Amino acid sequence: MESNRKYFVFRINYKKRKELLSEAQNGRLRQGWSIMEPNKKGIDVANDYDEYLSAWKQHWADDEKYIRNKYNQLQKITKIEEGDIIVVPKLPDDDKYTIFEATGKYYFDKSPEVWSGEYDFRSCIGVKTLGAYNYARDNNSRIVSNKFRAYRSAINMVWNNDFIDALEGNIYCIEDYVENIDQPEDNIKILCDLSDKVLENVSDKLFGDVSKWNPEILEEIVKKLFQENGYEVIDIKKYNGSGGDYDMVFQVPQKGIFYDILDSISYNEKYDCEIKLPLIGVQVKSKSGVDRNDIEGVKQLIKMKSDYPTDYQMLITTADEISSEALSEANKNNIIIIDKLLLTKLLIKYSPLVFGDK
């Protein structure tokens, strides 16, 4: 990490995402609320507030409290210097963010030409693209995506060390070894037959700081893992009011020999019975290290048996170990437990989330 560089979350107008992305790829990151129409002053946030206010009122009719707040927010763009890191959420699409390095300081684009049909978006920073990252790609990206919620303004300066460390982890990946893990076919062939020791290292990389993630991220990863392999989500967040809980319920894929058999029977008038594909009730636990209360996840599933019967019940956890108590209760009640290592294997083998787009 370069000790003197600063970090910023930079939010854009997503209605102009395609145009702003193209401009950023050509070395210029643009921000709005900086219009300059013919024969009017430009709204340049580098000016003092009085001059900024005067220019704003030539273009837009907003109350002064709003204008002052916007000025204070946008002024942070003038603090960006060469070498600073800028991360833009939801770019190039809703599932990714892009990291840029500033190549210069703020400037106001005074060219007479309109940009993309707009007189706006004249606040500019020179940038080079370091890379785009999928929100769920690895441990660092999940921490970054979780932290975005605390940075809602157009320009935000980042002071949180966990956020900064995760961004630096992304940058290290991009610069030093991302090309070695971006070959899906080769890596899946190699990793599907990993030794437990190597698999532990991969698993730790994926889930090492899972406790710092938004809890819903792991649930989304599990949901996508099953959906990508043909399972249908039947229900989400089901509770029985007595401590029972399913994070999600899946129906097994509508394909293959078993489905063809059931499908044929359901349309055969000789069979007077209701034919349904099996259901799986799933509880997901986002845990780091040893979960000393892992029995609770098993109990939540047991308590759902009578109110929401499914053919299978499954506890998926990222804890390092499963307690003997949880294993014993799971075995008594025919509950499947998927631990961190098995989940890692399944993601490697069946999901592009690990080795797909960055």
Image (spheres, helix red, strand yellow):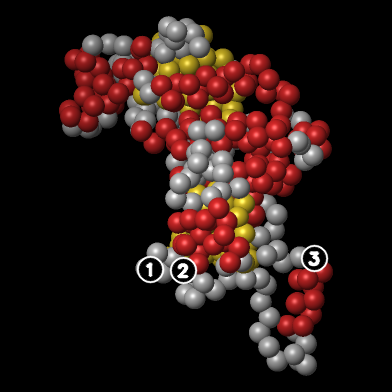
Q: Nearer the viewer, mark 2 or mark 3?
A: 2
Q: Mark 3 and mark 2 in contact (Cβ < 8 Å)? A: no
Percent from the top left, x then y, of residue 190? 80, 34
Percent from the top left, x then y, of residue 254? 72, 66
Please indicate, yes or no, whether residue 46 appears anywhere in the rendered image. Answer: yes
Tell me the quarter of the picture where residue 357 sits.
Answer: top right
What secondary structure is marked by label 2? loop
What secondary structure is marked by label 1? loop
Percent from the top left, x then y, of residue 286? 50, 45
* Residue underneath mark 1: 242
- Residue 347 in the image: above or below residue 133: below
Q: CA distance from mark 1 to mark 2?
A: 7 Å
Tell me the quarter of the picture where residue 63 sits.
Answer: top left
* Residue underneath mark 3: 256
* Residue underneath mark 2: 303
- Residue 303 in the image: above or below residue 195: below
Which of the two labelled residues, at mark 1 and mark 3, occupies the earlier sequence position?
Answer: 1
Question: Horizontal placement of 257 versus 118: left or right?
Answer: right
Tell me the quarter of the picture where residue 245 sits.
Answer: bottom left
- The residue shown at (66%, 37%) is 354
Please indicate, yes or no, whether residue 250 appears anywhere in the rendered image. Answer: no
Task: Tell which of 212 and 111 is nearer to you.
Answer: 212
Which of the two labelled residues, at mark 2 and mark 3, occupies the earlier sequence position?
Answer: 3
- The residue shown at (67%, 72%) is 277
- The residue shown at (66%, 16%) is 176
Q: Amino acid at mark 3?
A: Gly
